[in-house]
Image (cartoon, grey):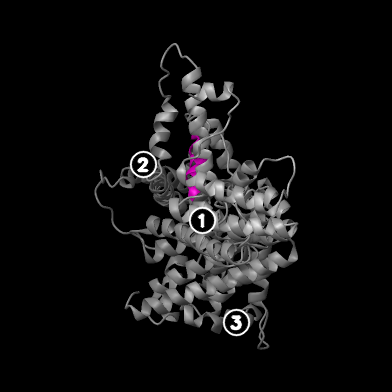
Amino acid sequence: MVVNQIREGCFQIDYGDVLEKEIAKLEATIEKTGEVIVDHSHRWLAIKLLENDAEIIEKFEKSEAGRKVLAAQQKSYAYLNDRFGEDVDTLFADKRYGWIHALIKETVKENSVEELSTSDKIDKVVTNRYLGIPIFMAMMWIVFKVTTDIAGPFMDWVDMVISGPLSNWIVSILGWLGLGGTWVESLFIDGIVAGVGGVMVFVPVMLALYFSLAILEDSGYMARAAFVMDRFMHALGLHGKSFLCMIVGFGCTVPACYATRTLENEKDRILTGLLVPFMSCGARLPVYVLFASVFFPKNSNTVVFLLYLTGILVAVLLGLILSKTLFKSEGSAPFVMELPAYRMPTAKNIWFHMWERTSSFVKKAFSIIMITSIVLWFTMMIPVDGGKFAESDISSSGFASASEAISPVFGPAGFGSWQATGSLITGFVAKEVIVSSMAQIFEVEESAEEDVVQTTFLGDVRDIVVGFFEATVDTLKSIPLIVGINLFSEEEEEELPQLNTAVAQHFEAVSGGHGALASVAFMVFVLLYTPCMVAVAAQRHEFGNKWTLFSMVMQMSVAWIAAVVIFQGGLALGLG
């Protein structure tokens, strides 16, 4: 009996025949080589070595006798890993907890049987060893389906407000100031409004995304996601705490880099920091939504979900490679966390998370993106062939010439044009700028002097209000479609916005009629290539110049290879 063992002073846990055999072998090796570490029993040292305890291993590495012990430890550790198919430290922990459970059962008398709480009952399913990861994937798919389906009507409404009333008001004010028809009007309409407005259209998408994530966080599910992914992360030499950093990366790469400070091991921090940029941040979402809605309108939510999943899979693959090469000698630390009880999300917390994150997106639109849009407009208005400022064709501008010089690099990926290349270059500033750059490039190039629709101020206000209520009704109609139920009659297909049409025509032309395939390659490149400059600065601050440069080169290389493989492989298979 457990109690008798303690009373008789025979406190020793039985770890089972297989583990005890390896403990005995290692204990005998320690005895043969001499007492390497004082104040510890040989059995305790053998167990800690089999648990891959970094501190004990470090002490053994200091002597020749200790290194002989470590050679035997590695053989036993590898044997146990192959025998049981899981981490050895987990095996020891299971045995200890089993011993504790037996001790409690034998010594503690309960007056009544405590029933499982509601949270525990849910966790039996949600954190199940086999169902946990599929449930997590299903949750993510629902998030992106809600994001694309719910936000669509409001995106159209914001686009209508920006391209209609707002543009009309700016043109009227500039005309009243005597600047109508000048380059100043072009700067405001084709530069600032097209650039910033092209990004502001995606504010409803960001609100829908952060609404969904806020519900998962406030309900307590995100903690379960880290718990479920712990075993999966062990394959990378990491643990669930690293996955928490990656989850933060779905919102923004910058705080995800700083979140790695919670990891105790320096190599864990660096490896996690190298993988975090492959988690698709919210800034990339506008690019996905634009291209998915153009080339895959009926399956846009699935395309977005697969892109996020691709980021995770690429991170896992690279993590496996790095953990077997640069970080080969490092083991992962045990992961302990307390799972909070499930609770009903509150409107206050949901709104706080939505507004905090979306407002950051809006502030960026009116700071970094506006400045970039203005600079981009000037570079597109300055000709290199001796023409007049703001009057020459955009294809002869300095921006087009610089982009044209780089564009052949992307020819094998199906989007080797200066327009696509130029958009990717501006994406180094912020990924949202890719959309605003395309809005400027295609609108300036294709719509020279469009007639402004003459309306009244009150008429514009009425259109804005009516359009908002129509978007709300369309959103309510789309809710049943999320679960595949159509309660309403089919509507006529609406005309695509100008930017969507321009993007579709351009990618079809530049890819030789394989626009859909080229768009997938483009989206995957945006997913994988170097994040914004702010994120790079955060990486440099946390991990130093060497690892930041390594990260940038790795990301660009992986992104280019993936894009080329997708396009060329798709052509070989007859896709697109």
Closer to the observer: label 1 or label 3? 1
Magenta segment's dominant SS is: helix
208 relative to 298, above or below: above
Q: To which residue does mark 1 refer?
A: 235
Dot 2: what SS?
helix
User: Which circle's residue, 3 or 2, is located before the other in the chain?
Assistant: 3
Query: Is residue 350 inside the magenta stretch?
Result: no
Cα distance between the residues tagged 2 and 1: 43 Å
Inspect the image, locate mark 3, and give the three-letter code of the amino acid beneath it. Answer: Ile
Q: Report the disc number at residue 476.
A: 2
73 relative to 517, above or below: above
> Residue 257: x percent and y percent?
65, 53
Q: Give the residue drawn at x 47%, y 26%.
A: 102
> Residue 478: x percent and y percent?
34, 46
Write down the region rendered in magenta: 219-231
Confirm or deny contact between disc 2 and disc 1 (CB under 8 A): no
